[in-house]
Amino acid sequence: MTQQNFTELLKYSIASGFVKPSERGAYYTPINIMLIAGAECGKTRLLTQFSCKKAYKTLDLSPKIISNSLIPKLEKQEITFLIIPDLIQMLGHKKNTVDSTVGFLNAIIEEGVKDNDFYGQEFHLKTKVNVGLITAITTIEFYQNIYKWNSIGFLHRILPVSYDYTESTVNSIHAIISDGRLLDEINEIKMKNGQKASIKIPKHFSEDIMQIMYRVRDRFSQLRIKTYKGSKTGHLHELKLDIKGFRLHDRLRQLARAICWLDSKGLRKEVNAGDINKLRELSLFLNFPNSTLNI
């Protein structure tokens, strides 16, 4: 896998907010991606490069930002994606603030919100809205929050992308810095006519997507974390994810639609074998830190 493949995955994730199933009434949501890597792995740089008018990009998220900035954009249906290049600021607030913010995210990236009361402010949306989330976190911070996120279901609503750089990639980046060159720019992703494209997945490709889902689910299910809860003499606690794969299956189907739409520049309305092969290739990036992929 290469850095180019990695950037492609993020592009397709954004594009997932611009497509929908061709089947009337079919369930779908945008894709939620969380980059998980150590310091100096370019997480924040990658996400700050994305340019998309339908995405709300912020380095922090709090009840004040949600009330004053995010909700008004939701009411006007101006955004389909929320990009937080680094979660560290959001997680640095007081515990009650963080819990409320994560709770709001937990709802808006899945079932959506319509009428709600958030930190004393009521808001009423004409229709229920949800957004996709693309964000990043260090491996250490991820482990510090994993128990809470698992308990509220947030962990099951994201696609984790855990990675590290190979020595070759490290050397390439040093060469770019030495030459004074810029790292690759990411072109703006646009939605034509303001309408989501309807993309069909032929039935004979459904089994292929199922098999991809099984392989990714098996990797996710191997995550094991042991730590002492409470005092230093507390009992050893092991976190074992119980993943049925329903959300994962939905996300992979939506990713296949996004690949079709973006690669064909909106000309194709039906997923083909090439799209499935690309989905299979990119699915290798979907990992928790226990099975980090080197790029």
Image (cartoon, rainbow, N blue to C red):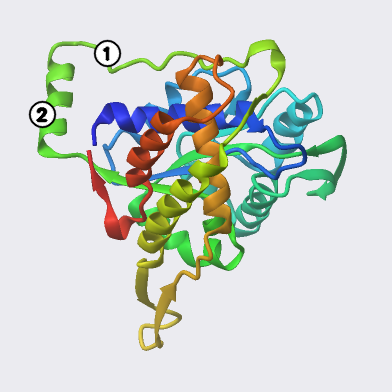
Seen from this angle, which residue lies furthest front?
204
Residue 53 visible in the shown view: yes
- Whole-Å distance between the Cαs marked 1 and 2? 15 Å
Please determine whether, in this image, residue 245 is positioned above or below residue 79. below
Quadrant for residue 52, please give it.
Answer: top right
For the image shown, how many numbered marks are present on the structure? Answer: 2
Please determine whether, in this image, residue 230 is positioned above or below residue 40. below
Q: Earlier in the sequence, mark 1 or mark 2?
A: 2
Instruction: Answer with left or right where residue 159 lies relative to residue 247.
Output: left
Is the N terminus in the top left, top right, bottom left or bottom right quadrant? top left
Dot 2: few (<14), some (14–19), or many (≥20) neighbours within 10 Å? few
Please determine whether, in this image, residue 155 is positioned above or below residue 260. below
Q: What's the amino acid at mark 2?
A: Asn
Query: Which residue is the site of mark 2?
Result: 171
Residue 92 visible in the shown view: no
Query: Which residue is the site of mark 1?
Result: 182
Q: What's the amino acid at mark 1?
A: Leu
Where's residue 27, x and y in %? 70, 45
Where's residue 33, x and y in %? 48, 42
Instruction: Answer with left or right where residue 76 lies relative to residue 197.
Output: right
Q: Residue at x 56, y 27 (%)?
A: 270
Q: Residue at x 14, y 11 (%)?
A: 179
Helix, strand or loop under label 2: helix
Nearer to me, 15 or 82: 15
Quadrant for residue 64, please give it.
Answer: top right
